[in-house]
Image (cartoon, rainbow, N blue to C red):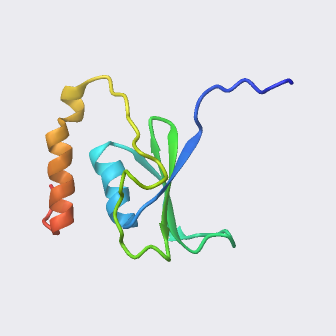
């Protein structure tokens, strides 16, 4: 069978519980580019809102499904377990503690610098 030669991943889709918070994280913490502002989904098979973010050329489709009642991620459920991003310099990116602090402040509703 003749198979196509894959050259890499084009994009990933994530279901998120809060679209604005997710956009803030991928854009403000990880340095992604917002390709498309949050908008109502334009597919008849999707009910909710979505946004598109780019991280190093990898597209991330962020989906906030209308039926999601804010439940959080749980690793024991079927779905994406994790994703790892590469960086040229951990010093420029910050530390995992910086990222954890950002997430904690956002979860508590505190201002994020």
Q: Position of residue 88 (x, y in %)?
A: 32, 23
Residue 46 placement: quadrant? bottom right
105 displayed left or right of 38: left
Q: Quadrant of the N terminus?
A: top right
Up/down of 57 relative to 22, above or below = above
Q: Residue 80: where, in percent of width, then height?
A: 46, 47
Task: Locate residue 77 relative to residue 39 in the image: left or right.
Answer: left
47 up-or-down from 87: above or below:
below
Q: Is residue 85 left or right of residue 103?
A: right
Residue visible at 49% across and 51% down in the picture? 79
Seen at 33% across and 42% down, the residue is: 31
Q: Quick check: can you spot residue 100?
A: yes
In the rendered image, the quadrant that contains the C terminus is: bottom left
Residue that appears at 48% across and 53% down: 78
Residue most toward the front? 76
**Residue shown at 22% from the left, 30% from the top:** 92
Question: In the rendering, at what x and y percent does residue 84 appear?
Answer: 38, 35
Task: Please determine whether, in this image, residue 85 is positioned above or below residue 65.
Answer: above
């Amino acid at each position: 069978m003749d198979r196509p030669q894959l050259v890499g991943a084009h994009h990933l889709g994530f279901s998120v519980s809060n679209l604005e918070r997710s956009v803030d994280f991928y854009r403000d913490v990880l340095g992604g580019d917002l390709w498309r502002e949050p908008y109502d989904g334009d597919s008849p098979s999707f009910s909710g809102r979505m946004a598109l973010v780019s991280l190093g050329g990898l597209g991330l489709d962020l989906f906030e499904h209308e039926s999601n009642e804010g439940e959080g991620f749980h690793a024991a459920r079927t779905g994406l377990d994790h994703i790892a991003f590469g960086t040229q310099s951990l010093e420029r990116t910050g530390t995992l503690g910086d990222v954890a602090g950002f997430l904690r402040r956002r979860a508590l509703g505190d201002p994020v610098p």
